Image: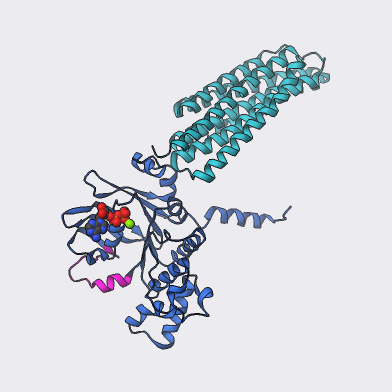
Chain colours: A cyan, B blue
């Protein structure tokens, strides 16, 4: 094949992307676990790990720019490299949301949780499982799988609305709970955003595989009323 | 920070959207040339087989494909330059504004005046810059002040005037390669053709000279129908509205594999053969 070197570079780039994906997936459960167990040590190390994740994202970005500048990729090559670049950015942002969970843990200190966590870990589990599937779709260039993953974002949004309403009833009953309610709401909000970003990853996979740019789950972008 | 008003920002936004390239062809674009079931033979060798394509007016159409697949041969059938090679035969039709240029009663000289050609290697005549451009109009009987005006206008349209206006009587061969190629464009447009065929016009030029020719083509497409054969896929992607991909069939005849909007050909081609060629995974 006349473009062996190029193909190897693209494959290596994709491997780095999947490694970044694996690290990012782990941050979701680490962040949630730290929140559940109020583990400030884990929270601190998660915040530190974010530096490494940012570094990986810039490495991928740089390599993608270099490929574009030196190889002038076209058609499916162009779509694949652009998708890798955009997915790396989504992953890095997902890790930022996990980092936000860690920061809530630190901020809350020893203050007791407003209520035992039930739906938040469920949201987190869904996010993790969706991201895992999305990364499989990336690895296999599988647009059908990507579409299936995106459809699951609805569940996350439903859980978020439920958490929102529940926390509001606490605040309405006793306004002194507002700070603790907001901490949990902020945690849920970050997980909800992760779901949206996984959907973005799904859209990139579909574009790379089919050349079609489509926005999925538009109806879910409405605010919670 | 740069201060901009809302209307300036909207202007910037609209310009970014309309851009100058790549050109979009709309449904109401008129067809300038129509190629139908075209076969071309060198003796017994069929170099082109069954090509059918419509070339829209006032736009740039690019033809890409590997060496020897018949791009130049096809381009030459568009103004009957192929007739100049002995033992050739054409089947099918090529129409210009609906009239078959291969009809018996068609004046070949007139066809070549209406459909001009710029070649791969700049080929100015060994004459002065002025005489190079004046050559065609003189044959048509133009002289005096009118001729001077045509020469100046053609050199301006070819984006060469400012560089040569003080040395019109120096030899065209003394110019740089890029200037020579723009001189050839000026010579071509001096007889006011309707279609300009370009066969790898930048392959002998450096990048800057290449960009100048591309800018020139983008200017010219407002008034001329341009068909360009190019090896440089980025060039096709930069300048053309439609792109045709040619390939050889098993008996080495050139066929048209895919023909469509340039943006689509370069981001999401319909045929695997096209994809393999433009991503360099060919053979
Ligand atoms: N004057 C000619 N006589 C015979 N065969 C020719 C002549 N010109 C080109 N060919 C043949 O026709 C085929 C297409 O050539 P050409 O149109 O020059 O291809 P391209 O421009 O795509 O490189 C080639 O196989 C070439 O050898
Ligand atoms: Mg050729």
Q: Is residue A56 left or right of residue A71?
A: right
Q: Nearer the viewer, residue A124 or B274?
A: B274
Q: Is residue B85 above or below residue A169?
A: below
Residue B273 place in picture, x, y as percent: 34, 41
Q: Say if the magenta span includes residue A154.
A: no
Query: In terms of image quadrants, where is residue A47?
Result: top right
Name the residue at 49% across, 72% down: B160
Residue A172 place in picture, x, y as percent: 78, 20
Residue B280 place in picture, x, y as percent: 40, 42
Bounds of the magenta span? B95-114
Residue B185 place in picture, x, y as percent: 41, 69
Q: Residue furthest front?
A: B174
Q: Nearer the viewer, residue A17 or A124?
A: A17
Quadrant in which the N terminus of chain A is drawn: top left
Query: In terms of image quadrants, where is residue B35?
Result: bottom left
Q: Nearer the viewer, residue B216 or A149?
A: B216
């Amino acid at each position: 094949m006349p473009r062996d070197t190029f193909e190897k570079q693209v494959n290596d780039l994709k491997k780095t992307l999947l490694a970044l994906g694996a690290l990012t997936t782990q941050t979701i459960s680490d962040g949630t676990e730290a929140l559940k167990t109020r583990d400030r040590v884990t929270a601190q190390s998660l915040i530190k790990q974010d530096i490494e994740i940012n570094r990986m994202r810039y490495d991928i970005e740089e390599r993608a720019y270099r490929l574009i500048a030196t190889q002038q990729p076209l058609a499916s090559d162009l779509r694949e490299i652009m998708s890798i670049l955009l997915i790396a950015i989504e992953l890095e942002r997902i890790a930022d949301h996990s980092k936000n969970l860690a920061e809530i843990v630190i901020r809350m200190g020893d203050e007791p949780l407003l209520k035992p966590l039930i739906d938040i870990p469920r949201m987190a589990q869904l996010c993790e499982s969706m991201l895992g599937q999305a990364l499989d779709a990336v690895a296999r260039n599988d647009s059908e799988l990507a579409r299936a993953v995106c459809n699951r974002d609805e569940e996350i949004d439903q859980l978020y609305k439920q958490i929102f309403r529940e926390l509001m009833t606490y605040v309405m009953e006793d306004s002194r709970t507002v700070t603790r309610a907001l901490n949990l709401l902020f945690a849920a909000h970050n997980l909800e955003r992760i779901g949206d970003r996984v959907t973005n990853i799904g859209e990139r996979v579909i574009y790379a595989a089919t050349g079609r740019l489509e926005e999925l789950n538009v109806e879910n972008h409405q605010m919670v009323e | 920070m740069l201060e901009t008003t809302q209307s300036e920002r909207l202007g910037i936004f609209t310009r970014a959207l309309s851009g100058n390239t790549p050109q979009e062809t709309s449904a109401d674009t008129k067809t300038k040339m129509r190629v139908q079931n075209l076969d071309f033979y060198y003796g017994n060798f069929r170099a082109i087989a069954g090509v059918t394509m419509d070339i829209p007016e006032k736009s740039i159409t690019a033809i890409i494909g590997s060496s020897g697949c018949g791009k130049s041969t096809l381009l030459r059938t568009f103004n009957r330059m192929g007739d100049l090679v002995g033992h050739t035969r054409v089947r099918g039709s090529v129409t210009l504004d609906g009239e078959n240029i291969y009809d018996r009663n068609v004046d070949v000289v007139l066809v070549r005046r209406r459909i001009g050609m710029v070649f791969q290697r700049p080929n100015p005549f060994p004459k002065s810059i002025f005489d190079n451009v004046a050559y065609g109009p003189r044959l048509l009987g133009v002289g005096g002040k009118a001729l001077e005006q045509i020469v100046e206008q053609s050199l301006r349209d070819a984006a060469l005037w400012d560089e040569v206006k003080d040395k019109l009587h120096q030899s065209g061969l003394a110019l740089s390669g890029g200037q020579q190629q723009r001189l050839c464009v000026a010579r071509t447009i001096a007889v006011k053709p309707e279609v300009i065929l370009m066969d790898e016009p930048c392959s002998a030029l450096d990048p800057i000279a290449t960009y100048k020719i591309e800018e020139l083509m983008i200017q010219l497409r407002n008034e001329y129908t341009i068909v360009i054969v190019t090896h440089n896929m980025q060039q096709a992607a930069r300048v053309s509205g439609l792109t045709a991909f040619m390939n050889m069939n098993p008996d080495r005849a050139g066929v048209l594999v895919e023909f469509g909007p340039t943006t689509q050909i370069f981001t999401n081609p319909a045929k695997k053969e096209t994809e393999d060629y433009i991503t360099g995974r060919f053979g």
